[in-house]
Image: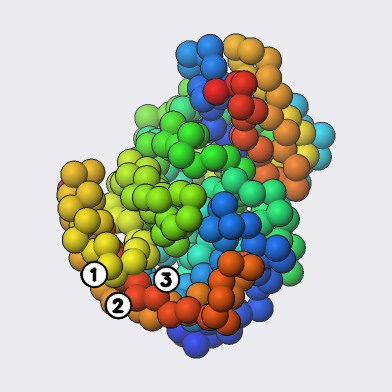
């Protein structure tokens, strides 16, 4: 699970949970690999992100690097900044661990890089 | 333009493993490499809907469409799938290819769209057509796909239900256009299938979001 995907995941589908966002991350294995940089794509994806969630997620797994806590104004034209965002969004990956519902504490396991958001019947 | 040839794409996709024990309830059968490569190639070369785009694959199964989208240069691909066994095969497939596609295990009808609403530029899928125990599943998938996509949805539906599918899509704010009529060779996968394979008429449809 890349942090770009984490940015969209919630536990709102759980019975009794109202927001279910953002999900906490307990990372057991993290893999960092090189991914081709596409500045246009990163600039286009940033407005779709919840920045605070991205920053906090990266920080919580020790990969925030030099990413600023608040989004800068001229991000579209700042290549250096886009590269940092690219790294955090696409190159850092949680292979094994858990996602945590912020309201109920329910764990969603991540195995082989795949978060399991399936619910038991009594949780719906 | 696509970075590789159609023939090459099909060859790549042919190397993937399919379902070991298909499950009737989930209506599991693989999209053939031939159909998958043609769907994706058309989406890229005719409409430029894959390269540099965010792509979702609903009911990704063993991952053939997800992987194909990645090969054609999609920037972020997420496959959504309920079944652990299918995801296991997918992981094996992807580790052999050294190309990375994301997957999320979830019940699509329950979990999506959530915060993924309008996140994807393109949704591509081969939904369960809905037969024995799950009539109308393809329409439910289609409804969710139109919520996830901001531009286009590519999907396969039975030709016999064409008018209904197009009418439903219009209700969801999507204008469907049949790109191709396919003969879908459904191999005998389940015990209750009497013939070794059945050809069904299937439409390949491109839906444009308004």
Q: Is residue B186 above or below residue B50?
A: below
Q: Write the residue at 38% across / 37% down.
A: B117
Kindly check if marks 1 and 2 are in contact, taking CB atoms under 8 A apart as contact: yes
Q: Chain of mark 3?
A: B
Image quadrant where residue B8 sits: bottom right
Residue A94 relative to residue A6: left or right: right
Task: Please tell me whether mark 2 sits on a helix, a strand or a loop.
Answer: strand
Picture quarter with the N terminus of chain B: bottom left
- Across and down, in percent, residue A80 comes to 52, 44
The residue that disc 3 covers is B40
Is the residue marked by circle 1 packed among few (<14), some (14-19), or many (20+) residues within 10 Å? some
Q: Residue B16 or B84: which is nearer the viewer?
A: B84
Q: CA distance from mark 1 to mark 2?
A: 7 Å
The residue that disc 1 covers is B178
Task: Please tell me whether mark 1 sits on a helix, a strand or a loop.
Answer: strand
Sequence-wise, the earlier of marks 1 and 3 is 3
Q: Residue A16 or B154: which is nearer the viewer?
A: A16
The residue that disc 2 covers is B181
Sequence-wise, the earlier of marks 2 and 3 is 3
Q: Write the residue at 58% across / 35% down.
A: A6
- Across and down, in percent, residue B201 comes to 34, 76
Q: Write the residue at 32% across / 44% down.
A: B143
Image quadrant where residue B20 sits: bottom right
């Amino acid at each position: 699970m890349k942090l770009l995907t984490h940015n969209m995941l919630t536990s709102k589908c759980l019975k009794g949970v109202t927001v279910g966002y953002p999900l906490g991350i307990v990372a057991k294995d993290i893999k960092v690999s090189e991914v081709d940089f596409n500045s246009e794509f990163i600039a286009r994806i940033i407005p779709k992100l919840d920045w605070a969630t991205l920053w906090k997620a990266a920080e919580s797994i020790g990969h925030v690097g030099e990413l600023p806590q608040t989004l800068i104004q001229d991000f579209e034209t700042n290549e250096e900044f886009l590269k940092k965002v690219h790294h955090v969004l696409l190159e850092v990956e949680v292979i094994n661990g858990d996602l945590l519902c912020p309201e109920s504490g329910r764990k969603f396991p991540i195995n082989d890089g795949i978060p399991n958001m399936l619910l038991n019947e009594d949780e719906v | 333009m696509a970075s590789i040839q159609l023939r090459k794409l099909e060859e790549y996709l042919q190397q993937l493993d399919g379902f070991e024990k298909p499950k009737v309830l989930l209506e599991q059968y693989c999209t053939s490499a031939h159909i998958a490569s043609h769907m994706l190639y058309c989406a890229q070369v005719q409409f430029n809907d894959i390269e540099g785009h965010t792509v979702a694959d609903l009911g990704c199964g063993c991952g053939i469409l997800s992987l194909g989208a990645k090969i054609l240069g999609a920037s972020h691909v997420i496959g959504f799938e309920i079944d652990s066994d299918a995801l296991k095969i997918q992981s094996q497939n992807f580790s052999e290819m050294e190309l990375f596609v994301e997957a999320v295990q979830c019940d699509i009808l329950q979990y999506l769209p959530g915060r993924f609403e309008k996140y994807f530029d393109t949704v591509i899928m081969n939904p369960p057509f809905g037969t024995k125990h799950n009539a109308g599943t393809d329409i439910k998938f289609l409804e969710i796909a139109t919520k996830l996509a901001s531009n286009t949805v590519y999907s396969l539906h039975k030709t016999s239900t064409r008018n209904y599918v197009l009418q439903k899509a219009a209700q969801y704010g999507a204008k469907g256009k049949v790109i191709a009529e396919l003969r879908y060779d459904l191999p005998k996968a389940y015990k209750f299938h009497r013939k070794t394979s059945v050809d069904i008429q299937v439409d390949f449809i491109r839906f444009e979001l308004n």
